[in-house]
Structure formats: C-alpha cells, structure tokens
Image (cartoon, rainbow, N blue to C red):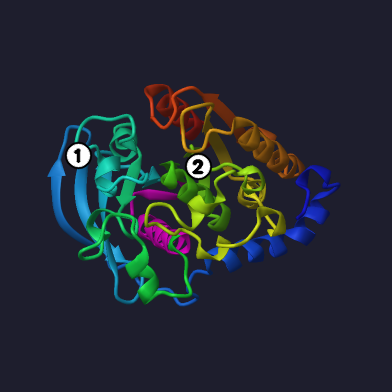
Amino acid sequence: MVDLSKLKSLAEWHSHRAGIENSILKLVGRPPKERVETQVKTMDEADFPRYTRKRVNYFVDEWTRVTAWLFVPHLKEEMPAVLCCHSRAPQGKDEMAGLKAPSPAAFAQLFAERGYVTLAPDCITAGERVSSRAEPFHSENFYKEYPKSSLIGKMLSDHVYGLDMLSEMNHVDNARMAVIGHGLGGTNALLLAAFDERIAACVASNAFTRLETDKNLERWYDDGGMCLIPGLRGVSAESLDFDWEHVLALAAPTAILVLTALSGASYCNPRSCQKAVTHAARVYKMLGASPAIEHFGHHDGNAVTHASVELAEDWFDRWV
C-alpha cells in the first residue's frame, strides 16, 4: 500500500494514481463502458414558495429507471446543483426530501431553499427500488442478477447517471456541482467525488473508518442482509492496496469536508478519519489545494444536526 505521508513529489503521486484507482475499481466494479441516455420523465410536480419539487425518473442502465426527487429553485440564472445521497433509510429518496417529517437530514429540500438545484434518487434496494418480497437493503436479489458486481459499485454507477441528468438541465451550472451524504450516503458521496471529476465539492458525514483499523470489517459484506462489497469477504485489510485516504486523494483537488462522530455512531473512530484526511492532504498540498480538505469531529453520534448542516452550507457556499 502506498504511504501517502511519504510522497515526495506530485510526479510520484501520478505514478501511483492509476494503480490505486484500478485496485479500488477491481473491488467495487467498473462502471459500464457503454452509456445510455437518461431520458428524463417528470411524473408529477408541486410548487412551493421557493422551489418546484418534481418526481422524476431516468435510465441508469438499458432496462432500469430510477425515481428521484428533483428540486428546482424559482430563479432564472444558472444555478449550482447538489446530488443528495440518502443514508441507510428504508424510505430512500424521501429522507432527503423531508417528506416524513422536518429533519436536518432533508438535504435536498434544505439546499433547494438556498438556491441549489437538488436531486435525491433512490439507491438500489431502497425506496421504490426494494425488490419484491425483500426487505430494504437486502442485496440477495441484486447478486442473483449481477453476480460479478458489487452493490456499492452499482450505487456509484447510478449516481454518475444522476450527475448526467443534472448536467443536461439548462439552468444548472455544470462547473458548480456538488454531492452530500450521511452514513451510507456519505460513503457514496466520497466515491462519487473520487471517480467523477464533475464534482466541485463534497460533504461526507459519518462515512467511513480506515479499513486498516476497522474492527468490524465484515460490515462491508455481511450487514443485516446487505452486502456492499463481496470482494472483501475473507480478505484482510493488510492485504489491500488502498484505504480511505487513497479514495480522498483520488478526489483531489475537489473540496472535501469530512464530518466524523467522536462517539455513539457506527463509524466513530475520529483518529482513523483524521489520519486518512491528513495523509490525503499531502496530495492536496502538492496540487496547491490545501484549504480544500478538512475534517470536523462532533459528539452527535449517528444524528444529522443543524450544526452539521451549517458546516455543509458554509462549505458549499465557499467552494461551489
């Protein structure tokens, strides 16, 4: 594994970058080379004082349409956009839209009120994408259809299509697209930032702990019926060619804010997260982008609080 803290030059980073990227994609799966047209359809819409909320769907592969909430502010000029990745919430996209009850985690609604076009799609196995007779986030049926894929890889591929959809909109500024997520959504947000150069800024909350020091590595392949990365089954962290600092470094110079619970959460190893950010920051420094990566710890456990949202708002206002 490449020790980013010992990199001596940008040329040395570039010599390792492709290998790191390949190692990650080998594990999570490469997105299909052939792309399909999104062919967006609006199913219904409702007007609110500051935005219009639309229920849309679009293709993410040859046969599959994903349903999402699209929020479009009542502004005429080109606007920044935020892709909102939901957490491990059975309701999927509805969490981001704040449909059940007002919540700080309703990122799609909150950022639309601040003038961002926002898109909140259902992940595979959640919301309207739960298989017949299956529980939310149970992946058995997915692997019957895609035995050589990974659930997290499919989520990454689908979120790339979400960016495609946003970039096709006339009133979206393609140079000002961001991504945000909490928990599983934070994991997805970081991967999207690492593998899609269109992302200008990312906020990832409670998204990871370093694999090398993760005492519960099986969460990635056996977590209550959800298998995110089957390739990690039976594999020791020491044998991997990458860790989360490498994912962060692949995103450079994209502006990334990592929010970490100091206690009471699934991922609550702040030293681990800080180490990943510190190591990745070396690449950011070499690229002249040191201010574009930060780590913030909090005592709110698994909860998304107004304080975390304010940090995210400030981050996007600064970088998008």
Q: Position of residue 211 (x, y in %)?
A: 62, 48
Span highlighted in magenta in the image? 152-177
Question: Disc 2 to disc 1, how far (Cα)?
Answer: 23 Å
Q: Position of residue 187 (x, y in %)?
A: 49, 47
Q: Majority secondary structure of the magenta segment?
A: helix
Q: Residue at x 46, y 51 (%)?
A: 188
Residue 92 part of the magenta-drawn span? no
* Closer mark to the observer between disc 2 and disc 1: 2
Q: In this view, does 3 lie above or below 296?
A: below
Residue of label 2? 207
Q: Count residues near mark 1 (Cα–Cα under 10 Å), then give few for <14, some for 14-19, many for 20+.
A: few
Q: Which residue is drawn at 35% across and 66% down?
A: 140
In the depicted view, which residue is nearer to us: 24 or 233? 233
Q: Which mark is residue 99?
A: 1
Among the 4 quarters of the image, the one containing residue 281: top right
Amino acid type at circle 1 is: Leu
